[in-house]
């Protein structure tokens, strides 16, 4: 290990080696416990209990987020992860049971292993180890897979002061992630006139009215970011009504997933799509979500992109910390998917980076899996980040 804190990290690395069996057992319990969005209660109890065991002050807020605290005074550093995962899909597509938490040749299989229970286990243990000179908050949030950033923003607002920096602990293959595209979800509608399907000339088919928009969406030229790449657009759902029986539909709606580069605003995106064809209604979607505690939240589905420059102090200090931990300078990357960084960096302007174990391409896939050695390495990485960032 290199750097001024190398001696301290050697001591912390030895402590993590001693805790390795407990870390592995904790991860197995997390993966074997289903925690779909809105149903994270059982895994939240496991996390709260483990956090208390390793020395955090723990609270569970009204949304059901589990919040662990270490240290006091000075600056506030936030480490953020989420407890929920997506559906496992058909069990026939898995060679290991999705909630079996089976380990084969040092690799643990199961839904959420990469996204992101491996990161949660590493985070909770890694940040419990070092002596810190600031307040460390470890947030384990609900509903990230459905409405990223909402629960994290709720926690930050409840703290009463703004974190000095945030570490988003999604899978990055042990690289340092510097940002992501944002996203918004839109609904576009076209209207027609019903008639009997045997006499379509007497009506106006709303599906046919939608076709020009669908064709133009496929050809839409989108802005490009030099690091994050271009925005993207995808139609993810199409419906019509009445939708049954021999009747020409008078309403057709599509759902549009629009990935955004930093700086794009939802009202601009709405106007852009509205201007593609006459007679189309376009709106930013707004939905209600219920937490496992019963807490309800109504969310406008706009989540801004963000990027932290290579020469930013947080990037430099994080790279130094991870180099001290691993004996080599990690690569930098950006995420293809969206994270709670939409709240920390995108909305609140908090300097943010990302780091975590696991190959991001395995997220949401059958046979999702993670190397236990990578989880152990990530735990040491989180130790190094907490140690260095608390001393700035």
Image (spheres, rainbow, N blue to C red):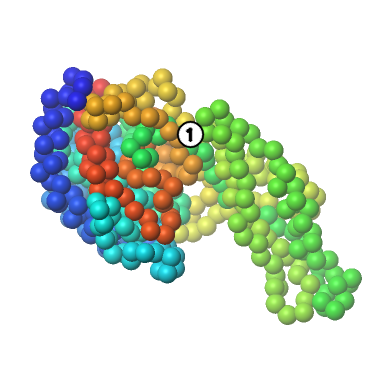
In the picture as drawn, the residue positioned furthest to the front comes out as 105
Q: Residue at x 31, y 26 (%)?
A: 329
Could you say which is closer to the camera, residue 192 or residue 128?
128
Q: Residue at x 78, y 53 (%)?
A: 212
Q: Residue at x 41, y 45 (%)?
A: 360
Which quadrant: the N terminus? top left
| 333 in relation to 189, above or below | above
Could you say which is closer to the camera, residue 51 or residue 223?
223
Could you say which is closer to the camera, residue 350 or residue 210?
210
Could you say which is closer to the camera, residue 381 or residue 359?
359
Which quadrant: the C terminus? top left
SS for dot 1: strand
| 226 in relation to 185, above or below | above
Q: Residue at x 79, y 72 (%)?
A: 248
For label 1, the crowd category at 10 Å Cα-Cα, with few meaning under 14, some 14 to 19 and many 20 or more, is many
Which residue, given by chain and number where applicable, does mark 1 sit on?
306
Q: Is residue 95 left or right of residue 376?
A: right
């Amino acid at each position: 290990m290199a750097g001024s804190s190398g001696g301290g990290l050697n001591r912390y690395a030895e402590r993590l080696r001693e805790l390795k069996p407990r870390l592995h057992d904790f991860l197995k319990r997390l993966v074997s416990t289903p925690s779909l969005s809105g149903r994270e209660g059982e895994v939240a109890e496991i996390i709260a209990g483990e956090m208390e065991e390793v020395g955090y002050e723990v609270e569970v807020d009204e949304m059901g987020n589990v919040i662990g605290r270490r240290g006091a005074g000075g600056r506030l550093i936030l480490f953020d992860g989420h407890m929920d995962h997506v559906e496992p899909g058909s069990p026939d597509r898995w060679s290991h049971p999705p909630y079996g938490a089976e380990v084969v040749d040092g690799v643990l299989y199961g839904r959420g292993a990469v996204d992101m229970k491996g990161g949660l286990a590493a985070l909770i243990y890694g940040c419990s180890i070092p002596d810190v000179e600031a307040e460390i908050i470890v947030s384990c949030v609900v509903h990230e897979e459905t409405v990223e950033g909402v629960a994290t923003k709720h926690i930050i607002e409840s703290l009463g002061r703004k974190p000095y920096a945030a570490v988003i602990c999604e899978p990055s293959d042990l690289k340092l992630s510097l940002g992501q595209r944002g996203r918004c979800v839109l609904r576009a509608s076209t209207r027609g006139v019903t008639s009997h399907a045997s006499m379509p000339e007497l009506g106006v088919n709303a599906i046919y009215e939608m076709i020009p928009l669908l064709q133009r969406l496929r050809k839409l030229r989108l802005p490009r970011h030099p690091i994050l790449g271009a925005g993207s657009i995808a139609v993810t759902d199409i419906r019509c009504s009445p939708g049954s029986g021999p009747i020409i539909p008078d309403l057709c709606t599509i759902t549009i997933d629009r990935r955004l580069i930093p700086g794009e605003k939802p009202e601009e995106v709405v106007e852009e799509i509205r201007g593609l064809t006459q007679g189309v209604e376009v709106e930013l979607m707004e939905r209600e979500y219920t937490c496992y505690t019963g807490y309800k939240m109504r969310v406008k589905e706009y989540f801004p992109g963000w990027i932290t420059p290579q020469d930013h102090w947080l990037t430099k200090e994080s790279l130094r910390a991870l180099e001290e931990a691993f004996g080599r300078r990690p690569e930098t990357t950006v995420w293809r998917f969206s994270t709670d960084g939409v709240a920390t960096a995108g909305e609140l302007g908090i300097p943010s980076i990302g780091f975590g174990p696991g190959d991001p391409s395995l997220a949401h896939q059958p046979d999702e899996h993670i190397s236990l050695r990578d989880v152990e390495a990530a735990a040491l990485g989180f130790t190094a980040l907490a140690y260095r960032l608390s001393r700035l």
